[in-house]
Image: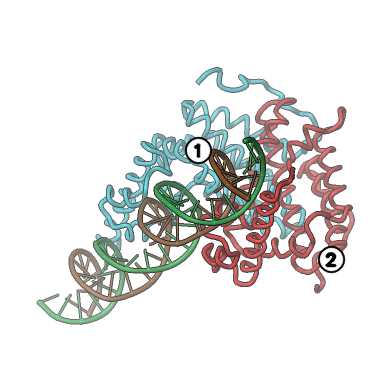
Chain colours: A red, B cyan, C green, D brown
Amino acid sequence: MAGLRERKKEQTRRRIAAVALRLFAERGFDAVTVNEIAEAAEVAKVTLFKYFPTKESLVLRGVGQENLAGIVAARPAGRSPLEALREHYRGFATEPAEAVDRETLIVQMRVIFASPALSSGANDLLHGQRLALARVLAEERDELTAALMAAQITASVLTLQERFFRHLVSGASTDEAGRRLCGDVELAFDLLENGLGQPLDRPFDRPLDQPGE
Amino acid sequence: MAGLRERKKEQTRRRIAAVALRLFAERGFDAVTVNEIAEAAEVAKVTLFKYFPTKESLVLRGVGQENLAGIVAARPAGRSPLEALREHYRGFATEPAEAVDRETLIVQMRVIFASPALSSGANDLLHGQRLALARVLAEERDELTAALMAAQITASVLTLQERFFRHLVSGASTDEAGRRLCGDVELAFDLLENGLGQPLDRPFDRPLDQPGE
DNA sequence: CAAAAAGATGAACCGGGTTTGCTTTTGAAC
DNA sequence: GTTCAAAAGCAAACCCGGTTCATCTTTTTG
């Protein structure tokens, strides 16, 4: 019934997250205390921690929630896990992001990249994904193979994400970053499929990084 | 000149690490405070932190110092990075561990696996390795390929390590774990070389996990 | 042996996070 | 509208990892 209570809570949560992101962007993650955030957001520290379990979660909320395991588990019959994932990321690269507004996302990523604590925190989030993916893959092959596949896949996806956001953060337009990501996705999945043995090494060539942004 | 001072310091460092490991093994990483460790090791807290920068480092000292980048950079001419790494891990799997005594190592790993904080801490240590490896690889290929290769390789190596130590921790003898690791190394590097596309899927078969431990 | 250099130390402090005990707000039943 | 239980909010005190600082002890060196 979407009560008043719910709305107020949602509003408070947003306010806290927004204030926190702003302060982090202004002065850096480590230089802002949760007390300051709570004060600026006009809640008690204890209340803040009821909404967000840790300081990091103020920024990492909803980052890297790809659910690779789900994508693989839900793939149509006859399609390999890699094909399914490649398809998914093709879609992600072409469609224009949606949901949260770009500006906020960029600031968020900038803050994350600027703080070692947050970067490695984001890293950790993928650990769970890796285990889940390994579990799904293990239904069709032996456990070690499944674990290795999951490890390679999540590592590659993480690399793609990092590059994508790094482009965005360093000023590329959403379109341009998306276009780059397109090629990157193909390369990444080709490497996964065919292995590192073949020197297929970037068949098409492109400007090898920003020629000035 | 190997002064008295040096010896005492080394001795103190060892004592602290040993006491910490014992306490962690007895009661778990989170249930032990650094004050307790300092007290039990008969040093001041501030002294403890001069030897070990963080609580985690009391356990993670020297864990996962493989230096993949170094191995690749130092490989003989004409050998591919993957070949060099495979060779290195073949050696590691056959030679019997050396250095630290097995018992301590096992306790250490048990403690690490039992604590999420430590597990993800150990994870983090590989992050630096990944970047270093990517940098070395980037000397011979484009940056994205290098980054993806580094990501896949470090992820695979981490998986191998985890399995190896998990075997040890769950009671396998060093020999047995080493023998398993042998096969695992070949599979892991075959997957890296040839890709996940080919269903080479474990050509030899083995008991597919502990039949009760 | 004396003075400098290096360590060790206790005490106070900081910041993230939790506990406790209390007040206020909300939603629903009467 | 009144009543009441549940939910949310709060201040203050606390815990723990980690740092700072000023002081004291030990080792080295000349």
Which quarter of the figure has residue B84? top right
Q: Residue at x 54, y 69 (%)?
A: A31
Amino acid at dot 2: Ser
Mark 2, mark 1: which one is toward the viewer? Answer: 2
- In the shown orientation, is residue A163 left or right of residue A5? right
How far apart are labels 2 and 1 at the CA level?
A: 43 Å
The image's mark for residue B113 is 1
**Could you classify mark 2 by the number of other residues whose Cα lies within 10 Å: few (under 14), some (14-19), or many (20 or more)?**
few
**Residue topped by disc 2:** A173
Question: Element under label 2?
Answer: loop
Instruction: Residue A176: tell me if it is visible.
Output: yes
Please tell me which residue lies in front, B115 or B181: B115
Amino acid at dot 1: Phe
Instruction: Residue B78: tell me if it is visible.
Output: no
Chain of the residue displaying label 2:
A
Q: How many numbered badges does the structure rendering display?
A: 2
- Residue located farthest toward the top when viewing the structure as drawn: B211
Please tell me which residue lies in front, A52 or B65: A52
Q: Residue at x 52, y 29 (%)?
A: B167
Assign the N terminus of chain A to one quadrant of the image: top right
Give the x, y percent position of residue D19.
41, 66
Give the x, y percent position of residue B67.
56, 51
Compared to residue D28, the image places residue A4 above or below, namely above
Assign the C terminus of chain A to one quadrant of the image: bottom right
Give the x, y percent position of residue C12.
31, 68
